Image (tube, rainbow, N blue to C red):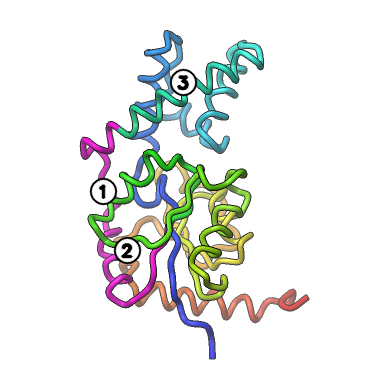
Amino acid sequence: MAPALRAVVFDVDGTLADTERDGHRPAFNEAFARHGLDVEWDAATYGRLLEITGGRRRIAADLRARGTDEAEADRLAAEVHRTKTDLFRERITRGGIAPRPGLRELVGGLAVDGVRLAVATTGRRSWVEPLVEQVLAGVPVEVVVTGDDVSELKPDPEAYLRALERLGLPADEVMAVEDSAVGLQAATAAGLATVVVTNGYTREQRFDGAVAVLPGFTGPPPLDADRMRALHRAGLDHRSASPTNGR
């Protein structure tokens, strides 16, 4: 008998909420201004910078590209990123971040069916926890792994491996939901069948290895608990049929 779906692990940024363009980006720009830096990231520039994982790394890389020496870029990046994190958390607590359409219906259906919920992100816990609480509207999340819990950023699988450890489940009983190629690489490296729900920044990326690539949670047909189970079975069937299985 094929393993049942026991838990779903969600990414946060771009997956639970469309946070990048209208959440993180304005917070970065306000942080730059507060530190007296003549830097402003428009939507297109920020989209290119998203190829760099981690906000502090993103800031440092951009400052170096603008001619700041490496040590100073790293120092400024750490300071700006602390300010940005505080600003983004304030935006969340004011109710400024909405869930992606259809998300609450999916997680509510999974919870009713007894499927456990978890989060695996490399964002900071100080803003991840209030964001998860806000966008999921009280649906219980059993495990929350953040950047405070890991030493490696995605595409390294550490965040997903830590989530599996805390859930106490094998990878074949768990699915991941991601929005980006980097996140997909992290989840599949941890052995998870993964559904990708794209957003405006990621829809043109390559998603080799995903069990499904969807433009949103609402479909048609909508991504609900029954469809998640079907996709989980499909992912397991594909894995067992792979010529490299068991090698």
- The residue at which mark 1 appears reads as 134
At x 65% / y 12%, what residue is drawn?
A: 69
**Residue density around tag 3, few if under 14, some if 14–19, many if 20 or more, within 10 Å:** many
Q: Which residue is mark 2?
A: 219
Q: Mark 2 and mark 3 in contact? Answer it, CB < 8 Å.
A: no
User: In the figure, is residue 87 to the left or right of 70?
Assistant: left
User: Is residue 31 rendered magenta in the image?
Assistant: no
Residues under numbered marks 3 and 1 in contact, where contact means CB atoms less than 8 Å apart: no
Circles 2 and 1, Cβ within 8 Å, touching? The answer is no
**Could you tell me which secondary element the residue under label 2 belongs to?**
loop
- The answer to which of marks 3 and 1 sits earlier in the sequence is 3
Q: Name the amino acid, label 1.
A: Gln
Rounded to the nearest angstrom, the CA distance separating label 2 from label 3 is 39 Å
- When the figure is inspected, residue 91 is found, relative to residue 226, above or below; the finding is above
Q: Specify start and end residues of the magenta stretch as a single range.
A: 90-118
Return the residue at label 3: 80
Residue placed farthest to the right in the image? 247
